[in-house]
Image (cartoon, grey):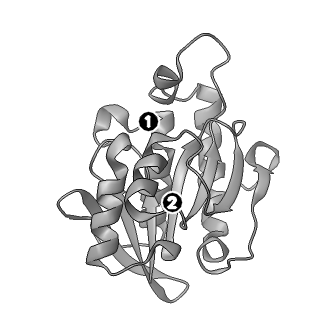
Amino acid sequence: MKLLVGLGNPGNNYSSNRHNIGFRLVDYLHEKCAFPLWTNSTNYQYSKGPIADEQVILIKPSTFMNESGKGVLSASKFFKINCKDILIFHDDLNLSWGILKKKIGGGHGGHNGLRSVSSLVGQEYSRLRIGIGRPNNKKSVANYVLSGFTTDEESQIPNILDYAMSNITDLIYDESFIINGINIQSKNIS
C-alpha cells in the first residue's frame, strides 16, 4: 500500500495559495478517482481507495506546513507504511512555474514542510516537485508562497493536475519512471 501526501496549510484562507498546490493535487485525485469522503484523524485527513486496482491512502496533514511531518508520521505508523512507500506532492520554489520533477530521496531543499517530514520519517520517500517559481520582485519568499497564483497561472493549474493524474500510476508504482523537467505550459493536454 502507498501513502500519497499533499502538502499545504489547512483552512479556506490558504486553499488558493502557491504553498497549497500539493493539497490541490491530492484533492483532484480524490475527486477524479472517486475516493470515499475524507476521514479526520488527530493531525491528518485521509481517504483510502484504488488507483490501478491497488489500494492507496491519500493524506492531507491538518497541521500547518512547517509541522507536516507530524501528520505523515502518524499516518505512516497507523497504516504501517514505510518511508519508501510514501509519495509527497509539494510546491517548489527552485523550479520555474509549470515544471514537474519526480525525485526519490534526498534533502528538503529549504522546504519547511519537507524538512518536518524528513526529520520525523526519514528522507527515503519519493516526491513530485511542482514548480511555482520565485518572486520576481523583492517580495519575501514567505509572502510569495502564501500568495495566490496570477490569473494566467491559475488558468494553467488544471493542465498541471491533469498531467499528474494521467501519469499517476507510473508516479506511484514505477521507481524507474522519470518526470524530469516537464514544462506543463508547453503541453496541450486539453
| Residue 43 visible in the shown view | yes
Mark nearer the N terminus (2 vs 1): 1
Nearest the viewer among 178 and 114 is 114
| Residue 188 visible in the shown view | no
Seen as rendered, the residue at the extreme top is 138
Q: Which residue is drawn at 33% across and 81% down?
A: 80
Q: Quarter of the image holding residue 60? A: bottom left
Q: Which mark is residue 95?
A: none
Q: Is residue 139 above or below residue 75?
A: above
Give how far across and how far down residue 55 sits, in percent: 43, 84
Residues packed near mark 1 inside 10 Å, few (<14), some (14 to 19) or many (20 plus): some
Residue under numbered circle 1: 16
Nearest the viewer among 172 and 165 is 172
Label 2 is placed on what type of residue?
Answer: Ile
Q: Which residue is drawn at 72% across and 36% down?
A: 96
Give how far across and how far down residue 159 sits, in percent: 66, 50
**Under tag 2, what secondary structure?**
strand
Q: Is residue 73 above or below residue 95?
A: below
**Under tag 1, what secondary structure?**
loop
Residue under numbered circle 2: 88
Label 1 is placed on what type of residue?
Answer: Ser
Q: Which residue is drawn at 37% across and 41% down?
A: 66
Q: Are the residues at dot 2 and dot 1 in contact (C-beta closer than 8 Å)?
A: no
Q: In this view, does 177 lie above or below 115?
A: below
Q: Quarter of the image holding residue 95? A: top right
Residues packed near mark 2 inside 10 Å, few (<14), some (14 to 19) or many (20 plus): many
**Marks 2 and 1, how far apart in space?**
19 Å
- In the picture, the quarter occupied by the N terminus is bottom left
